[in-house]
Image (cartoon, rainbow, N blue to C red):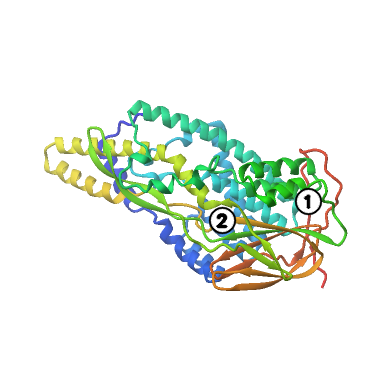
C-alpha cells in the first residue's frame, strides 16, 4: 500500500481524531465493577450511558451482562445483533478481503480509527455462547444452528488470516520493515512468548467450542457428528480426562429414563485488558520515534478447582483460556501493527519536514501543532470484549432427575444453589467473579428430546419451544 498524503491532510486528520480517541477500557471498568458486585442492572446502565452509538462491542457486552441475569432471550437477541455485524465482516472477508487489509486512518493516525470487527477468538466465542444460551433454555434446535455456524466461521477466519499474513509480509518486505515485537526495546516480550500462548495452534480455535458442539449433537442423537467434535476438542486440549471420556463413552451412553446428562460450564474472571505502552521504534530516515503498542498481561482471577454436588466433590477441568487466546491474537497481529506504526511514523516525519521546509510562520505553527497532536493521538487500540471470562471450564455428570444441591467455591468461601435436573441432556452456565457467583439455572425445564438419531448433517432442526416446569 503506497501512501502519498500531503502534510495538510495529515494535520486535518490528526486534529479531527483528537476528539474521537475512545478510552474503552476506562469505560468498561465501571460495568465490570458492578458485575463483580452482583449488580448486573447497574452494569447495564453504565454500558448504555457510554454507548450512544450501538456498535459491535456494545452488543457483545450487553449480551454477556444479560446472560448474568439469566435473561436468555434478551442475551441472545443482543448477541444476534452482534452476530449480524460479524456476518457482514465474513461476507467481506470471503468476497472482497482487500477492503479489510488496511484503512487510511490506521496508517496515518492510529489503529483506533479502524472499524472494530472483533478479534477472531471473539467471533468464534460469540457463536459458541449463543449455542450455550439456546441449549440452557431448552432450544436445542437453534443451539445446533449456532454450533454449525461456529465450524463455518473458523474456516472463513483461517482463509482470511492466511491472506492477511501474506499481504503484511509482502508489504513489510516492500518497505524494508524487518522489526518484530522481540526487537522493541522495553516491550514485555514474555507476555507473548509465554508457553501457554505458544502451545495454541491459533487464536480462535478452542476445545470448549468443539466440546459444546459435540454435546449438542449428542443431545440431538447425532453421534456421528458428535464424535468429530470430541476428537477436535482432544486435539486442541490433549491429555484432558473429561474430553477423552466424552469420546470414549459416546457409544455406551444412552438416554435412560429418569436420568440427566448435565454439563456445568464454569467460567471465571474477566478477559485480560489491553494497555497502551510507548516504545521507541527505530525508523529509517526518521530516527528513534516513540510509538504506542498494545500489551496484555495475564490477570490473577480466582477460578474454582472443584464443585460440591450432593456432598461429593467434582473436579473442574479448564478447557479454554480466553486469556491465552487474546495474547495469541496479539502475537499474531504484531507484524501488522508494527508495519502500520512504521508507515505512520514515516508519513508524519515526512509531513513535518514538508512544513518545516516552507519557512514561514504559518507552516512553523502547523508543524508544532502536528507534533503535539501526533503525541496525543499516538495510542494503541485497547478495545476488546471486556466482559468475556478469562477461563472456561466444564464439569460433566450423570444425575437422577430431580432436585440437587450444588456448592460453588468463591474467593473467600462458597455459595449454595438448588438445582433441578429435568431432562436427558442439560447445560448449566456458572460464572464466578471473585466472591460473586451467577448461577444459570433456567426457570424453564429443558425439553425432553426424541432419541432417534438424525441421519443427515444438513438437516436443520427447527427450534424447540421450552415447556414450563410443573409446580
In percent of width and height, residue 83 lies at: 60, 48
Q: Residue at x 69, y 52 (%)?
A: 242
Label 2–label 1 contact, CB within 8 A: no
Could you tell me which quadrant the C terminus lies in?
bottom right
What element does badge 2 sit on?
strand
In the depicted view, which residue is nearer to us: 312 or 302?
312
Q: Which mark is residue 219?
A: 1
In percent of width and height, residue 102 lies at: 42, 36
In percent of width and height, residue 10 lies at: 29, 40
Q: Residue at x 32, y 28 (%)?
A: 176
Earlier-in-chain disc, 2 versus 1 = 1
Image-quadrant location for residue 25: bottom left
Figure check: 257 above or below 407: above
Q: Which residue is mark 2?
A: 391
Image-quadrant location for residue 2: top left
Could you tell me which quadrant the N terminus lies in?
top left
| Residue 462 visible in the picture | no
Whole-number angstrom distance, CA of label 2 to CA of label 1: 25 Å
Does residue 139 appear left or right of residue 365 in this picture? right
Q: Which mark is residue 179?
A: none
Does residue 239 appear left or right of residue 224 in this picture? left
In the depicted view, which residue is nearer to us: 83 or 458?
458
Amino acid at each position: 500500500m503506497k501512501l502519498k498524503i500531503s502534510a495538510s491532510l495529515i494535520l486535518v486528520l490528526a486534529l479531527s481524531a483528537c476528539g474521537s480517541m475512545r478510552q474503552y477500557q476506562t469505560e468498561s471498568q465501571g460495568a465490570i465493577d458492578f458485575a463483580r458486585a452482583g449488580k448486573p442492572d447497574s452494569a447495564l446502565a453504565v454500558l448504555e450511558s457510554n454507548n450512544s452509538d450501538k456498535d459491535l462491542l456494545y452488543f457483545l457486552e450487553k449480551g454477556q451482562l444479560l446472560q448474568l441475569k439469566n435473561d436468555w432471550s434478551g442475551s441472545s437477541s443482543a448477541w444476534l445483533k452482534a452476530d449480524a455485524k460479524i456476518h457482514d465482516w465474513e461476507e467481506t472477508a470471503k468476497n472482497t478481503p482487500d477492503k479489510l487489509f488496511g484503512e487510511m486512518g490506521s496508517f496515518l493516525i492510529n489503529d483506533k480509527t479502524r472499524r472494530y470487527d472483533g478479534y477472531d477468538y471473539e467471533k468464534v466465542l460469540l457463536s459458541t455462547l449463543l449455542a450455550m444460551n439456546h441449549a440452557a433454555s431448552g432450544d436445542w434446535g437453534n443451539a445446533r444452528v449456532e454450533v454449525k455456524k461456529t465450524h463455518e466461521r473458523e474456516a472463513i477466519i483461517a482463509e482470511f488470516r492466511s491472506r492477511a499474513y501474506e499481504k503484511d509480509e509482502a508489504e513489510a518486505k516492500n518497505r524494508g520493515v524487518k522489526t518484530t515485537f522481540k526487537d522493541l526495546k522495553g516491550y514485555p516480550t514474555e507476555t507473548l512468548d509465554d508457553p501457554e500462548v505458544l502451545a495454541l495452534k491459533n487464536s480462535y480455535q478452542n476445545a470448549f467450542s468443539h466440546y459444546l458442539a459435540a454435546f449438542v449433537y449428542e443431545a440431538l442423537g447425532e453421534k456421528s457428528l458428535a464424535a468429530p467434535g470430541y476428537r477436535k476438542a482432544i486435539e486442541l486440549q490433549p491429555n484432558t480426562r473429561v474430553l477423552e471420556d466424552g469420546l470414549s463413552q459416546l457409544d455406551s451412553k444412552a438416554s435412560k429414563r429418569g436420568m440427566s446428562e448435565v454439563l456445568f460450564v464454569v467460567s471465571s474472571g474477566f478477559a485480560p485488558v489491553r494497555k497502551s505502552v510507548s516504545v521507541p521504534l527505530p525508523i529509517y530516515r526518521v530516527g528513534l520515534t516513540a510509538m504506542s503498542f498494545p500489551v496484555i498481561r495475564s490477570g490473577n482471577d480466582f477460578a474454582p478447582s472443584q464443585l460440591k454436588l450432593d456432598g461429593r466433590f467434582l473436579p473442574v477441568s479448564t478447557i479454554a483460556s480466553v486469556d491465552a487466546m487474546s495474547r495469541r491474537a496479539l502475537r499474531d497481529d504484531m507484524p501488522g501493527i508494527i508495519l502500520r506504526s512504521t508507515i505512520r511514523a514515516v508519513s508524519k516525519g515526512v509531513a513535518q519536514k514538508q512544513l518545516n521546509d516552507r519557512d514561514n510562520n504559518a507552516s512553523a505553527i502547523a508543524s508544532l501543532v502536528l507534533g503535539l497532536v501526533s503525541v496525543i493521538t499516538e495510542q494503541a487500540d485497547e478495545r476488546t470484549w471486556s466482559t468475556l471470562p478469562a477461563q472456561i471450564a466444564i464439569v460433566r455428570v450423570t444425575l437422577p432427575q430431580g432436585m440437587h444441591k450444588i456448592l460453588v467455591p468463591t474467593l473467600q468461601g462458597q455459595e449454595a444453589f438448588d438445582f433441578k435436573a429435568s431432562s436427558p441432556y442439560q447445560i448449566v452456565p456458572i460464572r464466578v467473579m471473585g466472591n460473586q457467583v451467577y448461577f444459570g439455572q433456567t426457570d424453564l425445564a429443558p425439553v425432553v428430546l426424541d432419541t432417534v438419531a438424525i441421519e443427515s448433517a444438513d438437516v436443520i432442526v427447527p427450534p424447540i419451544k421450552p415447556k414450563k416446569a410443573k409446580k
